[in-house]
Amino acid sequence: MNPFGHGRHLNRADFDEILRTTLKNCTSRVAFERGTFKDVHRTQEGLWNIEMDVKGERKRVAAKWVVDATGRKASVATKVAGSFY
């Protein structure tokens, strides 16, 4: 029996780096930058505008899909609660 309970446990920093590397190798259309999530809004066209802080500069990207992989914090889900239509 695992003392941490049922489920999988992983090193989050290592996992994030593997995910970034894999995505970079799978596409040439996306630029990846390390940043801090700030806000998200859904446009009338159905896209998501994601705002983040990258090295002190506020940046915005548009995406068709957003994956909240922030764990228990649910940083993205908390910002969009009630905004799905």
Image: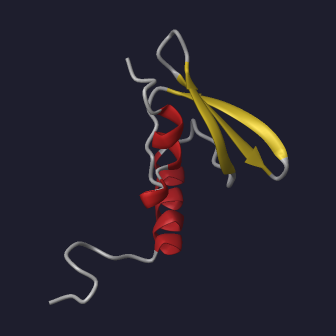
Query: Residue lying farthest top?
Result: 44
Q: Residue at x 49, y 42 (%)?
A: 78
Between 85 and 31, the residue placed more toward the observer is: 85
Which quarter of the picture shows residue 65? top left
**18 vs 22: above or below:** below
**9 vs 54: above or below:** below
Q: Residue at x 23, y 72 (%)?
A: 7
Q: Is residue 37 left or right of residue 45?
A: right
Residue 82 horizontal/vertical position (percent): 42, 27
Residue 74 horizontal/vertical position (percent): 46, 50
Which quarter of the picture shows residue 38? top right
Between 63 and 72, the residue placed more toward the observer is: 72
Residue 29 horizontal/vertical position (percent): 57, 35
**52 vs 69: above or below:** above
Q: Quadrant of the N terminus?
A: bottom left
Q: Residue at x 40, y 23 (%)?
A: 84
Which quarter of the picture shows residue 77? top left
